[in-house]
Image (cartoon, rainbow, N blue to C red):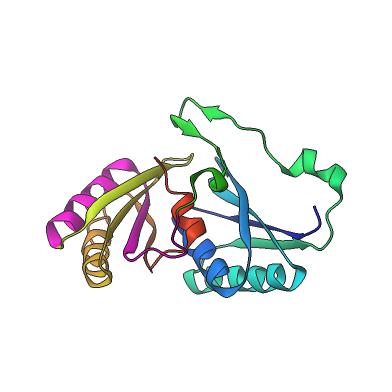
Amino acid sequence: MKDALALIEIGGWAAAMVVLDAMEKMAGVRVLQTELNDRPGVCLKLHGSLGDVEAAAAAAEGTASAMQVAVIAHVIPAPSPLGKAAWEAAADFNPLFEQSTVQYPEQRMKNESQAPFAVGLIETQGFTAVFEAIDTALKTAAVEVLAREKLGGGYIAVLIKGDVAAVQAAIDAGKAKVEGLGKLIAAHVIPSPSEGVLSLLPK
């Protein structure tokens, strides 16, 4: 690989999507693949010029800090071609989660660089909590469920879409319903999500 490589490890799928959106909007980087694990967490693997990758890693750290989420953002300026066998994960499927744990965004790219809608994410530890939150969100504003993603440890994220104001109102209402049912991990709104975020949405 001639490009620099960024490895971004972050706890939670929702936080990873918010961080990815910030990185792509900050610098000219592209996602190679993501790998889910039961830490729970996500490892984002991106490439681009050294300057862009360094700017993206700084954006990842800043965004994660603002969300109060732990992150490891590391840049390998000129990765050895022999190392690809280690960092590039093979496709696999986790029957417990009923989904792939390695995602290849290039295979699902959209034509637009940014979406003309907002995406809202609520991630909880505990299924009951997220289902109640999403039910409340759907009853609050004109939004629709877009997808859901599971990690280990009972972490589950549900995504909704709509215009920015509707998604913000829905997320605010939904996250207020989590207390007592589970643990709120993240609740965020991404206006006009980036191409990479769209490419990683679960089917």
Quarter of the image with the C terminus is top left
Task: Describe residue 118's horizontal placement relative to residue 53 as left or right.
Answer: left
Q: Is residue 37 depicted above or below 161 in this figure?
A: above
Task: Describe residue 92's horizontal placement relative to residue 14 as left or right.
Answer: right
Q: Position of residue 163 (x, y in %)?
A: 25, 67
Q: Which image quadrant is residue 162 in?
A: bottom left
Task: Describe residue 68's horizontal placement relative to residue 1 as left or right.
Answer: left
* Residue appearing at x 57%, y 74% in the figure: 26
Q: Position of residue 59 (x, y in %)?
A: 60, 73
- Given residues 121 and 173, the one toward you in this image is 121
Task: Describe residue 88's horizontal placement relative to residue 115 as left or right.
Answer: right
* Residue appearing at x 50%, y 65% in the figure: 21
Q: Position of residue 81 (x, y in %)?
A: 85, 46
Highlighted magenta segment, given as a residue range: 111-140
- Given residues 76 and 176, the one toward you in this image is 76
Q: Which image quadrant is residue 54 in?
A: bottom right
* Residue appearing at x 27%, y 55% in the figure: 178
- Residue 121 magenta-drawn? yes
Q: Position of residue 5 (x, y in %)?
A: 74, 58
Q: Which image quadrant is residue 55 in?
A: bottom right
Q: Is residue 33 depicted above or below 16 in this figure?
A: above
Residue found at the far left of this picture = 139
Q: Is residue 79 depicted above or below 82 in this figure?
A: below
